[in-house]
Image (cartoon, rainbow, N blue to C red):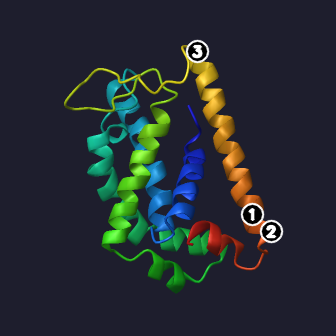
Amino acid sequence: MPATPLHCSVVYVINRWKERLSLPGLLVSSMVPDLEIPTLFLMTGGLQDRLVLHSLLGAGTLCMFLSVLLTVFFYPHVVSFFFKLDRKKVEKKCRLSITLILSCVIGGLSHVFIDSMTHEFNPVFYPIVKESFDTFVLTNDLALATAIVRYVLIGLLILFFVDEIRRGTKDFWMRMLVG
């Protein structure tokens, strides 16, 4: 499975394609589905680790709702504290808006799509269909599929970091985390 932060690679591509989208919303929502993994693991004794937030319906509703809350109320404080950014500027980019909501839906859906290429169990259509949707799994070898996706995502992330460094180190973290 791709490590959770690697999901950000795809939303950087999406944000470059559609710059009007909220980068903070995309970043947060691309990682929120993995919040259910420890919760479900503990609740089911390890029998289940991915379900609602890893489905299309869950990404478009519950994931979006959680992502909007985290982006508006939590992200500005954390990012400004750890990366020494101007909190007011970050808060301005994290305001509740239709664009933020749409960005959170897109980020959550991107997570579901990426995971559907690398996991043995993909509850993409949960709760309508409880069976796994494995059409996007790249190979019959999950370890190989995971390695392919992981290295592509790492490569993309490196490209974005290098491109932003090439633009200069001034406001680097603001560009990478806020847009």
Question: Please, is residue 149 above or below residue 159 in the view?
Answer: above
Q: Of marks 3 and 2, which one's residue comes earlier in the chain?
A: 3
* Location of residue 77 in the rendering, given as x and y in whole percent from the top left corner: 51, 73
Q: Earlier in the sequence, mark 1 or mark 3?
A: 3
**Measured along the vertical axis of the image, is residue 160 above or below residue 31?**
below
Which mark, by number, is residue 141?
Answer: 3
- Which residue occupies 56% across, 72% down? 178
Is mark 3 in CB contact (under 8 Å) with mark 2? Answer: no
What residue appears at the point 62 percent right and 79 percent down from the top-left corner? 85
- Between 125 and 96, the one lying in front of the other is 125
Q: Assign the C terminus to one quadrant of the image.
A: bottom right
Type of residue at label 1? Answer: Asp
Residue highlighted by disc 1? 163
Q: Which residue is mark 2?
A: 166
Amino acid carrying mark 2 in the image? Arg
Depth check: give the residue in front, 138 or 172. 138
* Residue at (38, 32) in percent of width and height: 50
Q: Residues within 10 Å of mark 1 (few under 14, many from 20)?
A: few
CB contact under 8 Å: marks 1 and 2 = yes
As helix, strand or loop, the secondary structure at mark 3 comes to: loop
Mark 3 to mark 2 CA distance (whole Å) = 38 Å
State the separation of the CA atoms marked 1 and 2. 5 Å
Asked where in the image residue 42 lies, by quadrant, the reply is: top left
